[in-house]
Amino acid sequence: MSSDNGFYIETIHEKYHGKDPVFFDKSEFEWVKFLENDYEQIMKSLEPVFTVDFDELVVNPETHLQFPPKLWKGYAFYFNGIKFKKNLSRFPYIAQKLKSIPNLITATISVLEPGAALLPHNGSTNGVMRVHFPLKIPGTYPDCGMIIEGHEISWKQGEIIIFCDMKMHAVRNLTDERRYILLLDIVRTEYAHIKKKICVHTIARIITNIFLNIGRSIFKK
């Protein structure tokens, strides 16, 4: 089955042939300045997350994307439309910021431990824009950064990057400090009418990959 009108989602369509841009122009979105201009206050509001004794980071379930394993962690506020009310209530300032972003479905503080590398991978749909809002960045590419479709990216603290998650990308943090970004998934305006469908199918894809990864681990033993 081929995608209709350029829309693609892995659990329905066979192959992605989209001509989506690698990057989206962030000047087109009002919420970008809303976040960037308030970077210092956002950092202050999230201070507990950056301390060494913050023990609520959760290992990303898709560990098969990472080498070494278990060094990719997160603290979720939203996950494909599901709200983590406890986390939102603990950080009310960022909760208010996120609430104002149209079509937001995922928001998490994504943490790469020292020495972590995410293998080349892509998302499950071109129906969302993947947003990186760099919070604490301990280095520049090639030690710490991302490569996507041949573009070598060094994150800059407080400067948002928006890209198409269907484009193959790899991420690394080879420094001796943690890397923190606020990772957002925002449904593109043209697909907002199927936002729930996108959430459901993305969750299904992640669950399937988790079980496949468990199966791989069992049969390797």
Image: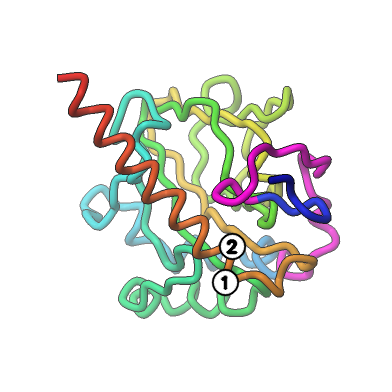
Q: Which mark is residue 42?
A: none
Q: Are marks 2 and 1 in contact (CB under 8 Å)?
A: yes
Residue 152's quadrant in the figure? Answer: top right
* Type of amino acid under label 2: Ile
* Type of amino acid under label 1: Lys
Predominant secondary structure, magenta span: loop
Binning the other alpha carbons within 10 Å of mark 1 as few (below 14), some (14 to 19) or many (20 upward) gives some
Considering depth in this image, is 13 or 34 the residue closer to the camera?
A: 13
Q: Is residue 141 above or below residue 32?
A: above
Please state the horizontal and vertical placement of residue 43, each as a whole percent of the image: 49, 60
Please state the horizontal and vertical placement of residue 196, each as a whole percent of the image: 57, 72
Q: Circle 1 — which element?
A: helix
The residue under label 2 is 198
Q: Circle 2 — which element?
A: helix
Considering depth in this image, is 149 or 179 the residue closer to the camera?
A: 149
Please tell me which residue is depicted at 77% across the width and 68% down the height of the picture. 189
Q: Residue furthest left?
A: 221
The residue under label 1 is 196
What scheme was used to colour the molecule?
rainbow
Q: Is residue 22 magenta?
A: yes
Please tell me which residue is depicted at 43% across the width and 71% down the height of the picture. 82
Marks 2/1: CA–CA distance: 5 Å
The magenta segment? 9-33
Please tell me which residue is depicted at 27% across the width and 27% down the height of the picture. 216
Please state the horizontal and vertical placement of residue 191, each as a whole percent of the image: 73, 66
